[in-house]
Image: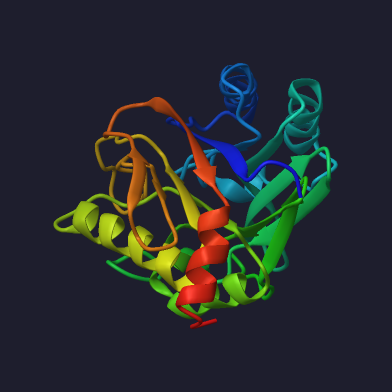
């Protein structure tokens, strides 16, 4: 393995309902992160089209224009990009998908735990995934999860057992009483469960519209013992920080819960 220092970025933006507009934002933010030396750039859940959009109408396969555009951006910038999008599923539903694309290959993760909580029913229009997924960024193993998955500790323990040193968590976290505090607590706890760095990238805050989850910001990089290494506020912004992967090895050796 090369250097133990791995530079990650979280692009805390607000996506619109237009995939073409959002792809342009992905290109702009990825280039900024690459210029800052990031090797992995994480975008929010629903980057392709924000919640409140007719998702079945914008969903596309990984050979469609949005995914092909993201793939091209990652190739041109020489980085790995993780971005939330929607892909077709059966019975008129979609999959809530994270596409991870970079020099080492390409992976997809379909969100396992659907947001049927706080009055929302994601399962009415989203079909669940079934697989725990890891990807590779050079020699670094990266686990993938999405938003509401953060409430399910076993998924993050499974990612740690699968060797993930870094876990990415694209999100579009719904606002409401206590939700910011829950986000802060859960992201730190899930980093501890995986004994990995967690890069949680949320949509920037916007005023709520009904039950649509539009984001609260507060993107964060948490370390394997739950420490906050970097955090954004509620507004749009780019978080870039270095993580030292030797800490993952040390924590797993000293606290062998996996």
Residue 196 or residue 146, whichever sits in front: 196
Residue 176 or residue 60, whichever sits in front: 176
Residue 41 or residue 131, whichever sits in front: 41
Q: In the rendered view, would you say 199 is above or below 150?
A: above
Residue 46 or residue 71, whichever sits in front: 71
Figure disc tally: 0
Q: In the image as oriented, which residue stretches furthest toward the left? A: 177
Q: In the image as oriented, which residue stretches furthest toward the bottom? A: 257
Q: Is residue 214 left or right of residue 60?
A: left
* Res. 54 image quadrant: top right
The residue drawn where x is 42% and y is 48% is: 172
The residue drawn where x is 33% and y is 54% is: 227
Q: Is residue 8 left or right of residue 95?
A: left
Q: Is residue 215 left or right of residue 258?
A: left
The residue drawn where x is 47% and y is 64% is: 122
Mark yes or no: residue 114 visible.
no
Q: In the rendered view, would you say 130 is above or below 53?
A: below
Measured as percent of width and height from the top left, residue 89 is found at 71, 62
Q: In the rendered view, would you say 81 is above or below 89?
A: above
Mark yes or no: residue 206 visible.
yes
- For the rendered model, the colour scheme is rainbow
Image quadrant holding the C terminus, namely bottom right
Measured as percent of width and height from the top left, residue 58 is found at 65, 41
Q: Is residue 17 left or right of residue 31?
A: left
Measured as percent of width and height from the top left, residue 177 is found at 14, 56
The residue drawn where x is 36% and y is 34% is: 204
Measured as percent of width and height from the top left, residue 254 is found at 47, 75
* Res. 224 image quadrant: bottom left
Q: In the rendered view, would you say 166 is above or below 207?
A: below
């Amino acid at each position: 393995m090369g250097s133990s220092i791995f530079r990650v970025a979280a692009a805390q933006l607000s996506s619109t309902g237009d995939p073409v507009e959002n792809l342009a934002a992905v290109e702009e933010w990825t280039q900024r992160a690459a210029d800052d030396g990031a090797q992995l750039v994480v975008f929010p859940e629903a980057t392709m089209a924000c919640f409140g959009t007719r998702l079945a109408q914008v969903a596309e396969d990984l050979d469609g224009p949005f995914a092909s555009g993201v793939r091209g951006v990652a190739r041109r910038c020489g980085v790995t990009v993780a971005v939330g999008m929607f892909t077709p599923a059966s019975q008129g539903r979609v999959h809530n998908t994270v596409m991870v694309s970079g020099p080492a290959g390409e992976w997809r993760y379909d969100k396992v735990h659907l947001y049927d909580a706080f009055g929302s029913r994601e399962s009415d229009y989203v079909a669940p995934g079934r697989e725990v997924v890891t990807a590779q960024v050079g020699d670094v193993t990266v686990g993938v999860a999405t938003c509401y998955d953060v409430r399910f500790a076993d998924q993050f323990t499974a990612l740690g057992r699968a060797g993930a040193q870094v876990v990415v968590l694209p999100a579009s976290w719904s606002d409401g009483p206590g939700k910011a505090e829950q986000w802060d607590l859960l992201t730190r706890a899930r980093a501890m469960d995986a004994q990995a760095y967690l890069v949680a990238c949320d949509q920037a805050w916007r005023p709520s519209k009904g039950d649509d989850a539009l984001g609260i910001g507060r993107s964060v990089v948490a370390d394997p013992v739950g420490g906050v290494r970097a955090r954004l506020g509620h507004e749009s912004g780019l978080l870039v920080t270095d993580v030292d992967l030797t800490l993952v090895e040390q924590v797993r050796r000293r606290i062998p819960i996996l």
